[in-house]
Image (tube, rainbow, N blue to C red):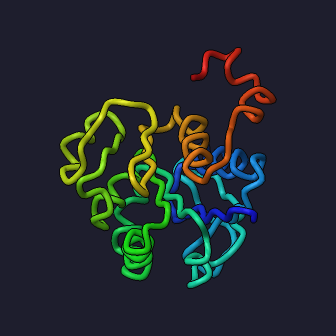
Amino acid sequence: MTKKAAVMMIDGFEEGETMQITDLLRRAGVETYTYRFQDEEYVLGMQNIMVKSDRVFSEEVRKADVIVVPGGRTCAAKFIANEEFMNTLKWFNEQNKLIAGMCSGTIVLEAAGVLKGKKATGYTGYEERLKSAEFVHEVAVFDQNVVTSQGPATPYPFAFKIMEALGIDPSELKTRLLYKEAGGR
């Protein structure tokens, strides 16, 4: 059965993280869609790049096997202010469904209460902000139903960790991408 991923996009999202994660999950055979919170299909990223999203955020997201919250300097506050989205994250946690956040996305997971008692990592200095988690200094971490990653330079290990959490072996994809030759682990 094909796994499904819902990757969130809101004004201020980090374009590189979001598009790399989406691309890697799709290459691994995960049915992956990007979701926006506005009618306009193009979402303004952190670097002022307009990126076309696939769908409008709705109840459909709950059908995904994993919900992904990328980073972006200003987007965390916007995600946190969206009550429907935060309730969806809490619902994913209650259902023990996979939740993934990187960079400032980890702040969103903390605000939703889904990191409590779980190992997590985050961007430099986030140890103080992810208070309910057991903070670990690793590039990407999977604990219980949550995958977290540090920041802008980590979309590859983050996506590979999501794949592993979904039961997909990323080895073949890593080989095709020359990941090991580039020094990836």
Q: Quadrant of residue 126?
A: top left
In the image, taking residue 162 as reference, residue 55 lies left or right, namely right
**Residue 158 to residue 32: above or below:** above
Q: Residue at (35%, 60%) from the top-left corner?
A: 108
**Residue 132 to residue 170: above or below:** below
In the image, taking residue 100 as reference, residue 1 lies left or right, namely right
Q: Quadrant of residue 91?
A: bottom left
Residue furthest right in the image: 176
**Residue 85 to residue 156: above or below:** below
Look at the image and tell me in which quarter the N terminus lies: bottom right
Residue nearer the viewer, 40 or 177 = 177
Tally of numbered tags: 0
In the image, taking residue 114 as reference, residue 100 lies left or right, namely right
Q: Residue at (30%, 56%) from the top-left corner?
A: 115
Look at the image and tell me in which quarter the C terminus lies: top right
Residue nearer the viewer, 39 or 182 = 182
Q: Residue at (32%, 54%) from the top-left corner?
A: 107
Q: Residue at (50%, 53%) from the top-left corner?
A: 70
Q: State the image coordinates of residue 184 (x, y, percent, origin top left).
A: 60, 22
Q: State the image coordinates of residue 55 (x, y, percent, origin top left).
A: 68, 75
Q: State the image coordinates of residue 153 (x, y, percent, origin top left).
A: 52, 32
Q: State the image coordinates of residue 164 (x, y, percent, origin top left).
A: 59, 44
